[in-house]
Image (tube, grey):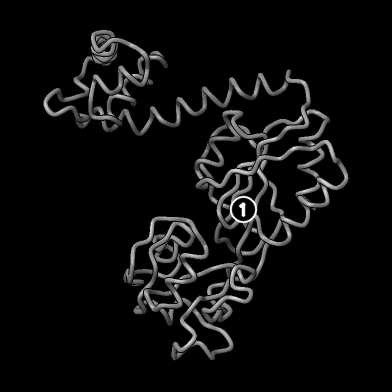
Amino acid sequence: MDPHLLTTFVTVARHGSFSAAAAELGYTQSAVSQQIAALEADLGLPLLLRRPVEPTEAGRRLLEHAGPLLLRLRAARADVLRAAARPGHRLRLAATPLAVNPVVAARLARARAENPRLEVSLHTVGRDQAVAMVAEGRADLGLADGLAAPSDPLRLLDAGPMTAVGVSEEELVVALPAGHPLAGRAALGLADLVDARWLQTPLCPLARLRDLVGDGFPVGLDYQGDNVHTVLNLVAADHGLTLLPASALSGAVPAGVPLAAPRLVHRVELLHGALPPGPAADLAAALSG
C-alpha cells in the first residue's frame, strides 16, 4: 500500500468528496479517482462508495490503520532530518491548554532569561496534536497534560520513538459553584459525584472519569472549547462540575474542593525527539527542572 495512495484515500474519506480532495492535494479529480482505483485493485476490495462518497466496511478498517501509518512515516522523516539539523535559537513549543502551569511558566521564564537570544513561539493545541507536531517536526518541544495516578505516565498517542518526561504533578480539585452544597467539604471522592451534572470538556473528558469509576457523570453542558476562563464561568453559573488542577482555580469564583479518591494528580509531560546539543536541548533541560 503506497503511502501516496493512502494519503489520497484518507483525504477523500475526510472530505467525502473526490473534487475537494483533489483541490487540497493539488491533483486533478481524474488523478484522485485513478489513485483510489489503484489502491482498491491492490487490496481487491472496494474502499469507497461513490454516491454518496463514504468508506465501505473495508474502507473504515483501512482508515484505522492509515492515520497511524502515515503519522509514523512523517515522524521517521522528521527524526532523520532533526538529527542532521543545525541548532537554532527560534523554537516552537506545542502545549495543551493546561500544560503551562505556574511551575512550567516560571521555568520557561528562567530559560529565556539565561539565554536572551532564545525566541519561543508557544502554540496551544490538543494532546494528540501536540504529540503529532513534535513527531512530525512541526514543533521542537511539546507539553501535554492530563489525569494520572501519581508518577504514572500519561496515555499518549503512539507516534514512534519519543521522549516523554514528567515535569510537574499537582493536586486535582473538583470545581463547583460557590453556593454548591458540597463546596464546604474538606475533600471529595469521584464515586460520590457520579449522579451530579458535569461539564463535557476536552480539559476533563468524562470518558476518562467513567473509566476510573464506572457509569454515571451525566452531561450538564457540552463545551468543546479549551478556554479555562470559559470553563470556570460555566462552573460558576452551575452548568456542571469539572476537575481542574488546583493552580487553575487560584482566585477564581468557583469553589475548589480537593479530590481524595481515586488518588489522581494533574500531570504535565515534556515531549521531544532526539535533541542534539543546542538551545532546544537546553530548553528541554530547563523545563524538566
- Residue 185 lies left or right of residue 41; in this view the side is right
The foreground one among 57 and 115 is 115
- Residue 83 lies left or right of residue 60; in this view the side is right
The foreground one among 85 and 212 is 85
Query: Which of the 4 image quarters holds residue 192?
Result: bottom left
- Label 1 crowding class (10 Å Cα cut-off): few <14, some 14-19, many 20+? some
Residue at 50 percent of width and 47 percent of height: 126
Residue at 58 percent of width and 52 percent of height: 154
Q: Position of residue 289 (x, y in %)?
A: 80, 53
The N terminus is located in which quarter? top left
Which residue appears farthest toward the right when viewing the image?
114
Query: Which of the 4 image quarters holds residue 83?
Result: top right
Residue at 82 percent of width and 39 percent of height: 282
Is 250 rendered above or below residue 146? below
Label 1 SS: loop
Is 56 rendered above or below residue 36? below
- Residue 26 lies left or right of residue 82; in this view the side is left
What is the three-letter code of the residue carrying label 1? Pro
Q: Position of residue 94 (x, y in %)?
A: 60, 42
Q: Position of residue 148 (x, y in %)?
A: 57, 61
Residue at 49 percent of width and 85 percent of height: 178
The foreground one among 101 and 62 is 101
Please state the total of marks drawn on the protein image.
1
Is 192 rendered above or below residue 221? below
Query: Which of the 4 image quarters holds residue 256?
Result: bottom right
Q: Position of residue 266 (x, y in %)?
A: 60, 63
Quickly name the residue at label 1: 153
